[in-house]
Amino acid sequence: MASFSTEREGDLLTVAVEGQLVVGNRADFKQLVFDQIESGARRILLDFSGTAYIDSSGLGALVSLAKRARDEGGALHITGLNEDLRTLFELTRLDTLFKLFATRGDARAAF
Amino acid sequence: MRLEWRIASDVREIETIVAEVTTACANAGYSQRVCRLNVPVALTEAIANAIMRGNGGDASRSVRVCAVVGEDMLCVEVTDEGAGFDAERARAMCEDPEWLEREDGRGVFLMYALMDKVETWCDAGHTVRLVLRRT
């Protein structure tokens, strides 16, 4: 399945998704990030460089997290999309909704 | 190669099926991109839809998955015990700009986008057939 590793520096939360983000684990993923937002995270950086694929449930979870971050005055940035994952974002036009970055450094610098 | 499963309506069952079909495709020489993207995502969507919408998540209802991995074509049929849905309408909804910020509703759209052909019908349950030609 998948694992999520988190790093927290002040209000910056970085989450790396290893494996898949799919219907079977998206609720856990959402809750993990929601809990961090509750505890003050406002800059949310999601790293998918270790992610095999994301299904529609996973994409939906990202939409929900971005809204929540925005509602709390924060922002959500995404990095590490391989060519296949980028195709998914383009097909669903989510590349127009999210801020996508080539590297973690770029994503952090843009907050 | 023909693969077949009958599973309870539990999303935890999806991963094994997707992995086995994807491995069969890889062994049959389907492209890496197809095995990394098209097959796992479209098949995950079809089974998840059958479990959650077709069977309403009712664990007493089952889902049947039958995959034929051929030299020229992959064909997967996913059958649930529900009454079916208007797949074309579900696909079209996702193309509505208003839909962009909604959490749900991209699954059927992705099936159509990632497969060469998607067919649906109701007989003894509702079936979605996914077809992908090997290129």
Image (cartoon, helix red, strand yellow):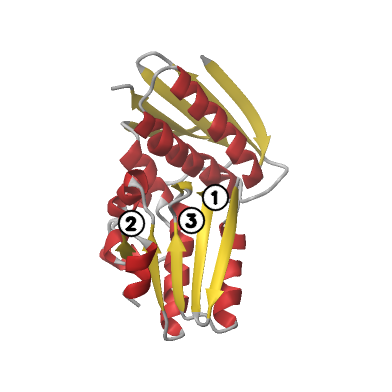
Can you identify the residue that label 3 sits on? Answer: A58
The residue identified by callout 1 is B53
Q: Residues within 10 Å of mark 3 (few under 14, many from 20)?
A: many
Q: Nearer the viewer, residue A70 or B86?
A: A70
Q: Do circles 1 and 3 both sit on a common chain?
A: no
Residue labelled with disc 2: B93
**Chain letter of disc 3?**
A
Q: Residue at x 59, y 45 (%)?
A: B51
Quick one: label 1, few (<14), some, or many (20+) residues within 10 Å?
some
Callout 2: residue from which chain? Answer: B
> On the rendered structure, is B32 left or right of B23?
left
Give SS at disc 1: helix
In-front residue for pair A80/B12: A80
Q: Is residue B36 visible?
A: yes
Where residue A21 appears, as percent x and y from the top left, is: 51, 52
Quarter of the image holding residue B130? top left
- Residue A50 position, x and y percent, is 48, 49
Secondary structure of residue under mark 3? helix
Residue at the image point whose x is 48% and y is 56% from the top: A58
Residue at 39 percent of width and 18 percent of height: B29
Crowding at dot 2, Cα within 10 Å, few <14 / some 14-19 / many 20+, comes out as some
Q: Earlier in the sequence, mark 2 or mark 1?
A: 1
Residue type of the residue flagged with mark 3: Gly
Q: Position of residue B88 (x, y in %)?
A: 33, 45
Does residue B115 lie above or below A97 as drawn?
Answer: above
